Amino acid sequence: VRVAVVDVTNSDDTNYIPCDQPPVSCDIDPNQALCQYNQNVDIYELDPEMNTGATFLRHIANRMYRGEYFAMQLGTNTKIAVAPRWDEELINQFEATNNEMAIITTLLSDARIRSHEARSGGSFSDVAIEIKENRITLCHASYERDSENARRLLHLRENQVDQEPPSSKRSRPMLQPFWSSEFSFSRGHFVLNVPYDPHLCAVDQQDEELSMTLRAFTHGYDFYTPTNGMMFRLVTGSSTNKGSKTNGVFSGLINEDADYPMCDGKENKSRIRLNVLTEMKSEDDVPSWDETDKELFGAGPVRQLKKFFSCFGVHVRQLITEQKLCDFVVSGNLHDEFVGNMRSNG
């Protein structure tokens, strides 16, 4: 396993600590993971002044891809807990799809740190946790008004479905319409075929995920909900509800409250670019837009975007979505209908 990290930090800061520095010197405790596997961790330090948002950070991280067979992305602002033999289990789930273009993707379930142990000051490996196993299906999107009163297609966490499918559908990953930046596991070519667009400034997670969903679909990728969770968000306190506000043990790659000084005045232009590239807006609807590298960061050659919109009931001109899609997905009916008509390579 090789890990790529983009650390937004200032090495001149008095509190600066390198991201790959273990808690204890390797001379004292050489068995720490960062001592044993340091050569497998690649770090890119980015000055906060140069940060233009999550898509730019992930673009840099993916530039560190070196041909590995599988690629995994985690995107959450909390510490992650992993299940034993997580890598073998994820590979088994991927192979169970019988689809070279499969992407196992979901929202992470919560793992709660027991309060008395969270306060004890013990090392992370000694902390007991309680896992709430969820099978979250990414099946809902709707047009809602944002903070600027504009209607946007949103893919909100609290609207996704935490529900077990029928018993006959639980042994294998099941098709779903959407992709999540919080957890994604695929063949490595996904990183190459659907690169993050570095020209998008300060776009939020909603825009990021919908952009990647639509672009990946047009490159022939299919999204599956996993049979069981292998990664969990570590939270403190008593709540493990899917939509609860979590208390991060450590800060992660993405800082949702970050300021992006280089993006001043560019946020709306970035959203227009994203919407035109994904055909959620027509070029005729905007006076001008940033066409930089539009072939590289636009739709792929395998499927048309209008196929996605028609299959999943998204009406981009009327700004509405058809309801009850989640019932069709969670029941397994979508999976059964689509799998029977897939190409031999997915």
Image (cartoon, grey):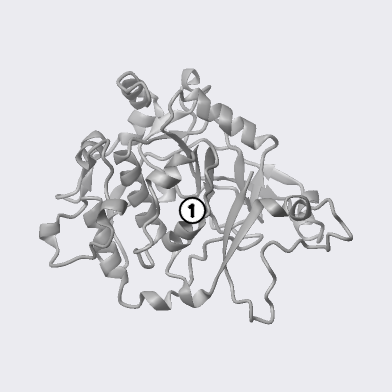
Residue underneath mark 1: 62
Q: Residue at x 35, y 78 (%)?
A: 264
User: Left or right of 185: which side holds 211?
Assistant: left
- What x and y, as percent, mark residue 123? 80, 56
- What x and y, as percent, mark residue 50? 47, 74
Q: Front-most of 98 and 114?
A: 98
The answer to whether 163 is drawn above or below residue 277 in the figure is above
Q: Residue at x 24, y 34 (%)?
A: 311
Q: Front-most of 127 and 289?
A: 289
Q: Quadrant of the N terminus?
A: top right
- What x and y, as percent, mark residue 118? 75, 57
Q: Is residue 183 visible?
A: yes
Q: Front-most of 166 and 272?
A: 272
Q: Is residue 148 visible?
A: no
Give neighbour class at mark 1: few <14, some 14-19, many 20+ (Cα, 10 Å). some
Q: Residue at x 39, y 25 (%)?
A: 331
Residue extending furthest toward the front: 66
